[in-house]
Amino acid sequence: MASLLDALVTGLVYGGVYALLALGLTLQYGVARILNLAYGDFLIAAAVFATLLYQHYQLSPLVSLVLVAPISFLVHLLVYHLVFVQLERRSGSWRAMEASSILLAFGLSFVVSGAMLAIFGGKLFSYSYLLVPVHILGSVVPANRLLAFVLALVFGGIAYLLLVRTRIGTAIRAIAVDPDGAPLAGIDVRRWAGITFAFGGIICAAGGVLISMFQTFNVPMGVSFTLKALVVVIMGGVGNAVGALVAGLILGVTESFVARYVSPGLTLAAVYGLFVLAVLTMRTGILGRALR
Amino acid sequence: MASIARTAALPLLLLLAALVPFTNNDFYVALGVSLLMYATLATAWGVFAGPTKYISLATAAFFGVGAYTVGLFYEKVPMLLLYPLAAIIGAVLAAFVGLTTLRIQGMYFTIFTFGLAELIRQFMTWYQRNVSGSVGVYILTDISARQIYWSLLVLLALTLLGSWLLSRSRWGLALLMIGEDELAARHSGVRTTAVKVIALAVTSAVMAVVGAIVAPRWTYLDPSIAFNPTLSFMPAVIALLGGMQRFWGPLAGAIPLVILFDQLNARYPTSYTLILGLLFMVIVFVLPDGILGLLPKLQRLRAPAAPAVTPAPGAGTLSEPVTPAAPARQTSPGVDGTSGVVTTASATGTTLLEVRDLRKAFGGIVAVDELSFEIREGEVFGIIGPNGSGKTTVLNLISGVYEPDRGEIVFLGRPITGKPPEDIARLGIARTFQLVRIYPALTCLDHVIPAALFGGHARTLTEARDHAVHILEELGMGAFLHVPAGQLNFIDQKRLELARALALRPKLLLLDEWLAGLNPSEMVIGMELIESLRGRGMTIVLIEHLMQAVRRLCDRCIVMSFGQKIAEGVPDDVLRDPEVVRVYLGEADDA
């Protein structure tokens, strides 16, 4: 019984972080129309950054979080304008642009992970931060996980409120719904799509730092994070923040149960199972219509 | 002459390549194996991704499955049986991926393929750890590098042959149409899902066989070798570098890239991935059409000799007054090609299509509400109503774009409710679109041929071609056969859509505001054209805003308002109906 509860709590913690990751990715895909296959690799970069700061300067990951956000924002803004906007200018049709932007993002993923591989290789990263047991619901959880979970929810909540309650958020949602119509309402699509892409980058980096707080990771793991975020996006419905939260929790719990009761080697199979289910049964995500 | 030289070039090249192992230079053979392996993978990848623009990132998955088929079974099953076995496993896996994700448009396919290799890699790792208790498998065979080289060469030759045959067949055309506009392809009778899944399965089977052939080269196989992401990445880079939709593309891309990366891998093993990624990004940027894209002369390799009949845009032809198919009005072989069926002009009275209690809601908006009507053979039936009254939705329900929430649609006594567009097109209901849906890059002929082919009555490509030429000529478009549709002016694009619809030899033709947007003189031509179709007994459903057109063309019509039918009858009576006047012009005011 205790182990069941453990699995559930672990799953929920992971699920909260996955939901945050999915929120960043769905912003990038839904607004900037870029399927960012390098997402997980950027996430690992942020996680490595936090780890190195902790190991060398004993800097708390909470400080790293503050440092990494503007850096990631700038990097993503540059990537958007120097890479993807240029590509769009070159290609004629939108379909052609979509195909080549996927390939370009795939290339970007190789560049980001390749650069880190060249420096660190397949070395494992981890550090022990806030390794204090906390008793919750009759289960014992390390404080770092709990903090990561809470922060993930807080960040996700802030992002959601920004989108729904502010003028800029409304403009961004307008772009998501109709990129051709938005300029007619005086919205500078290129500019705000770039900023949204970069904002998604902040969320991605924040997710990376949170993950580094409680999980051992290495560079080649970037792909699996991209994949999990994508699956959560599809399950939750593109552009649907609440859907992403529910889907993230489902994914986290499923993964944790499979790891505990079936085999840790088959978690990816569980992720895929959920993906197939989502695609086959729920075309608009588990909560029905997308948030628009 | 040039084409003979081109045709001879490939066999010659392959023969020369076959001689390489006789040099007894191990380095050349090893490099050749890499080259052939990637060229074959890239060709297979490009056959599917090139025309359809569906990007698969799962080459490593299929390759690895093939390699593992050999790794796990080579001791129990003879080698020669393992190749077909690998092909079957690869095809089944691909069919599963395709059936899951290709039914829906969008990015699901790419995302699914993105992680597929990773999934299988994890699964194989788990399998080996837990079932066979090791990390990898040893493959100890007496197959030499030379044999691998020759096997790959044969496979490459077969793949190229297949790709060449495909580009000349109806299926090649179908794949192209899917890449351009999937819905329009379905309305031409193309079973898009089946075509996509089969193409994906066959190309994936080739990838699996490549894996099976190459497997003995590594004496030790583990999941990180067999499912290496680079294997998914390289074929895409190669195909892109060479030019995606070009026959020679993968070969032209493979030679420089494989040699380059062989060198890079040897000199900078640690930054290899980084360089690979950077180079790939540069290629996407600088050479979006590939090396061969730089040679525009080779551009139309695909078209079976389309000499310069094509009039240059603006050379006078496009601005010439368009003549309707005037002779066709007197002679019996129809524009619709239903040469044998000579029906009299008047409606015969038998019911062709019956719509009963049809209802379709989008969320809270009821677009079509309890709608019923009958269309008799040979009549022109109008559907009119203000904007947003649900007219186009009715057409979309009949032609299978949407599935109705309730109600029934019966065509020729058979229920067709909920059938997919391609089936309905094949049964003989053709349509045009309110906003023209053409494939700008394809020629007029390429638009019409598939409809003739997939409509199920033309058996050969030549037959379909003749039929298509015939229809286009009768619609006065004989001069535009080889002109890309994007260069046509508006009425000609509309006529092209009509030609595409007629090539299905429809029993019922659905025209969605076909006259909208035409200038007055074009309008006259357009109306004459529809009249000539009616003159030959074609049953037509006409959605129209122009009352003069409705009066002149329609035998009967219904008026819709907010999804409901508010009037039905002869146009003159219906248009006098006070309710109809109110809906169109608003309440009579006091002034």
Image (cartoon, coloured by chain):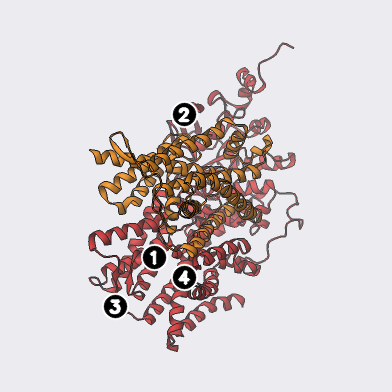
Chain colours: A orange, B red
Q: Mark 4–mark 3 contact, CB under 8 Å?
A: no
Q: Are marks 3 and 2 on the same chain?
A: yes
Place of residue B382 in the rendered image (x, y in percent of width and height, measured from the top left): 58, 32
Q: Which badge, 1 or 3, is on the more N-terminal residue?
A: 1
Label 2 sits on what residue type?
A: Arg
Q: Which badge, 3 or 2, is on the more N-terminal residue?
A: 3
Look at the numbered disc 2 and give the secondary structure of its residue. strand
Subunit ID for the residue under disc 1: B
Whether B485 is drawn above or below B29: the answer is above
Mark 3, Cα crowd under 10 Å, few <14 / some 14-19 / many 20+, is: few
Q: CA distance from mark 2 to mark 1?
A: 49 Å
* Residue position marked by numbered label 4 in the rendering: B38
Mark 4, Cα crowd under 10 Å, few <14 / some 14-19 / many 20+, is: many
Subunit ID for the residue under disc 4: B
B96 left or right, relative to B331: left
A192 left or right, relative to B85: right
* Residue position marked by numbered label 3 in the rendering: B141
The structure residue drawn at horizontal position 45% and vertical position 83%, both measured from the top left corner, is B27
Subunit ID for the residue under disc 2: B
Mark 1, Cα crowd under 10 Å, few <14 / some 14-19 / many 20+, is: many
Look at the numbered disc 3 and give the secondary structure of its residue. loop
Q: Which badge, 4 or 2, is on the more N-terminal residue?
A: 4
